[in-house]
Amino acid sequence: MTAPAADDAARTEPSTPGAGASSAHPTRPAQPDRYGAPRPVHTTLVLVRTGTASLLAALALLASTPALPRYDQAASTAYLLAGLLLGLPHGAVDHLVPAWLATRARPLSVRLAVPLGYAMVAALSLAAFRAAPTSALLAFLALSIAHFGAADEAFHAERAGRPIRYSAVGVLARGGPPVVFPLALWPGAVDPLLARIAPGVPALLTAEVRSLAGACVLAAVALTALREFRAGRRTEAGEPILLGLLFAAAPPALALGTYFATWHSARHVARLLHNDPASRADLAAGRLGPPARRFARRAALPSLAVVAVLAALAGLPGSPADPLPATVAVLAALTVPHAALVAWMDRWASPLADPAP
């Protein structure tokens, strides 16, 4: 689960207090890219700005929670669905990523294998979700923790020019709050939603299971915050604490919808822009508009295709009026190949990693 190592000593982040405080600042000295060439400092601007924007969105929601009414289940579902759909484009260009990270042009058969394999894995995952929704939903919750946490670990490393290396405790600290805290602290709001997707899941997640999971996440948050603070990375130290407070205080559907759209998805899109060779010149010149528009054009058709599939499923004879189960099933099916591809991307996009073949 680590990027290929070159010279560890050359890549070690300073550990003295304050040494990493500038890791998220655009004036940080240029770090080499995966080919060993100097990467212009401005190319990290998209990561810096997106990280700041996601923090501000989370802080704004947290600050507003005292004024929020206790949304009932029917009202809050709309916020969850909206957040899921708004975040949908972040995986829409997955089929292009292997070519971005490759060192040479690939034949058509190889280029077609990526989207075809992606579609096959997604179709098999959807079939599994339909055949065994209880087991599939539990597996999806576990995968979400790993994927959310690894995504944040990779985002911080890429923004700071560090090699991407997952820490199990760090992954749990960053990916646990969005999944575990709603289950542990908001069972009255979450269980009806789970029951609409897989009726057997709430009974399996007993109070003891939820309490143990919550305690593990709390411990991981504390350890990660302490580790990052000692390394001088104060923003990275505070983020797991912020996520924990957000998912403890805000209504779950609203918190998860906001997190998915403005935090997880936005940060992944920033990483895609950062690794897209076509955006390199614009980012080096400090221009964010052209790369963002290029991404929007590329992501539009795949995103609309997924929306069309969801609409078709909802329109099938005998389909339930509730769109939540079909939406979660389709997104869960897409998450399986997406998470696998992002893990591969983390391996090859890491600074100083050997380029993808």
Image (spheres, rainbow, N blue to C red):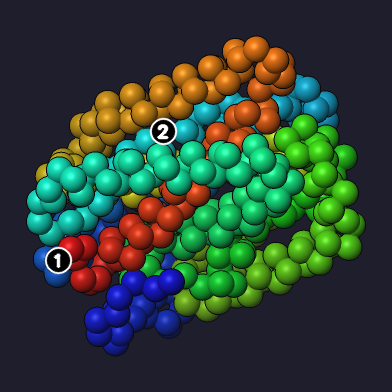
Residue 110 visible here: yes
Near-viewer residue (168 or 314): 314
Label 2 packing within 10 angstroms: few (<14), some (14-19), many (20+): many
Residues at marks 2 and 1 touching, judged by CB atoms closer than 8 Å:
no
> Residue 89 shows which numbered tag?
2
Near-viewer residue (312 or 32): 312
Say left or right for 247 vs 204.
Answer: left
Q: Residue at 81% across / 66% down in the picture?
A: 212
Q: Quadrant of the N terminus?
A: bottom left
Q: Residue at 52% across / 28% down in the picture?
A: 85
Secondary structure beneath disc 2?
helix
Q: Quadrant of the C terminus?
A: bottom left
Q: Position of residue 329 (x, y in %)?
A: 61, 36
Q: Residue at 65% across / 66% down in the picture?
A: 221
Secondary structure beneath disc 1?
loop
First in residue order: circle 2 vs circle 1: 1
Q: Position of residue 159 (x, y in %)?
A: 34, 59
Q: Position of residue 244 (x, y in %)?
A: 68, 55
> Residue 35 shows which numbered tag?
1
Check disc 1 and give the amino acid type.
Answer: Tyr
Residue 65 visible here: no
Furthest residue to the bottom? Answer: 9
Near-viewer residue (1 or 238): 1
The number of numbered discs placed on residues in the rendered structure image is: 2
Check disc 2 and give the amino acid type.
Answer: Pro
Query: Please, is residue 285 above or below residue 297 in the view?
Result: below
Near-viewer residue (3 or 50): 3
Q: Position of residue 30 (x, y in %)?
A: 20, 64
